Image: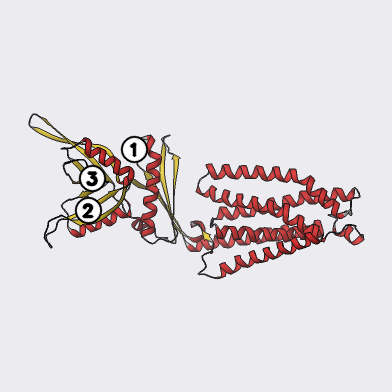
Amino acid sequence: MTRYRVFALIALLAGVLLAYFVWATQANPDSTYQFKLGLDLAGGTELVYKADMASTSPAERSGALQALQGVIERRVNLFGVAEPLVQTERASALSGTTEDRLIVDLPGVTNIQAAVAALGKTPTLDFELATTTTVGTTTKTVYQSTGLTGRYLSGATLGFGSGATQGLATPQVLLQFNSAGAKLFEQITKDNVGRTLAIFLDGQPISTPVIQEAIPGGKASITGNFTAQQAKDLVQNLNFGALPVPISLESSSSVGPTLGAAAIQAGVIAGFIGFALVALFMIVWYRLAGLVAVVALAEYLALMLAVIKVIPVTLTASGIAGLIISVGMAVDANVLIFERTKEELREGKEPREAVHIGFNRAWTAIRDGHLTMIISGIILFWLGTSIVQGFALVFLLGVLASFLSAVTLTRIYLLAIVPEHRSSAWRFLLSSGFHKS
């Protein structure tokens, strides 16, 4: 018993420290461990963009979409939006085809027009080979895609034409491609010496240089007819991110901070009421064992909130619902344990022996129940939308924590206080409902 009492004290101290951590970090507005709230709780704007994959081969669409996500993330971060969230999804359109979409969450931005302006329009960059044909007296130039786009761009800098005198220098935009882009650019210039390699920005040719030789190293220059300021702006836009594929705004929505605060308040109230009712039932029906379960349940909540802060998990209204439901899982496991223990007591077992056997007999049902919930949560997170994923993630964490709470904490606390032999007082404390063991 001494060993279990030491473990119980350590577990109780750990629970108090976790609760203090949750309270202290939330009370300090400058703490890095404040709860990270989703748009539905903190307020903000959600923009949904459609990615135009018409000119992208099916094999390259996944990579292009990931590159697009990275570009938009850099773009939003550079504009100073606090903790943006950029996600991609493939959804079915009304026509029966699938669409690649980009979902941009901007917490704290409730003006949709300002949100769209903040995201801005980033340029699409393409390198295309020119082919000139003449039919009779008409000359026509056709441009052919090379596959080299802004997706392969790693950076851009401002430069000036070599040999130009100060004040008359011709501004240039110097491009640096990544390793894959460097190889592709070298191969294009090697195979097409003497041909025009036009540089398109947003579908318009801004420079039409002629390839003189193979260019290794992944460096290129744009020498269009623009001023130094225009070249500087272009460099800035390209560094913000040249889009690998065009995008168009499909829908937008915003949640005001007042509505978000109301959702938080409703979730907290629901959580407190639910916990209070569960605690009351457990103590009234299971007496001492119920009180022990409530203590373990409180530690479970402290652990869950601390994990949500540290990871951090973006907390949404659906996430709060997942947390509340996982509390029910923790209670369910305790009920199984107590009922099995009660059966052993009725058969004449001593209290500590009954607790040991009760936990052992309840283990299989607890394990299987939690395992099925974990599988369900994984499937929801894998296949669900962002709202469902928020619920699934918190629910999964809650199931794991409730498993720890029921199987470990409750067992330690009970074995720390339950005696070897039962008296009339212990007979009442270990009874449940309207029966005595």
Q: Secondary structure at mark 1?
A: loop
Q: Is residue 133 shown to the viewer in this render? A: yes
The label on residue 309 is none
Instruction: Determine the residue positioned at 34% across, 46% down.
Output: 247
Residue indicated by mark 3: 200
Determine the image quadrant of residue 1: bottom right
Q: Earlier in the sequence, mark 2 or mark 3?
A: 2
Q: Amino acid at mark 2?
A: Val
| Crowd class of label 2 (few under 14; some 14 to 19; many from 20; radius 10 Å) | many
In the rendering, at what x and y percent does residue 28 appear? 54, 70
Determine the image quadrant of residue 81: bottom left
Instruction: Determine the residue positioned at 69% across, 44% down.
Output: 369
Foreground label between 2 and 1: 2
Which of these two is toward me, 261 or 80?
Answer: 80
Residue indicated by mark 2: 173
Residue indicated by mark 1: 56
In the rendering, at what x and y percent does residue 74 appear? 37, 55
| Crowd class of label 1 (few under 14; some 14 to 19; many from 20; radius 10 Å) | some
Q: What is the CA distance from the residue labelled 2 to the residue labelled 1? A: 26 Å
In the rendering, at what x and y percent does residue 389 appear? 54, 48
Which of these two is toward me, 13 or 43?
Answer: 13
Q: Earlier in the sequence, mark 1 or mark 3?
A: 1
Q: Are marks 1 and 3 in contact (CB under 8 Å)?
A: no
Instruction: Determine the residue positioned at 36% across, 51% down.
Output: 71
362 displayed left or right of 387:
right
Instruction: Determine the residue positioned at 25% across, 41% down.
Output: 186
Q: Secondary structure at mark 2?
A: strand
Q: Amino acid at mark 1?
A: Thr
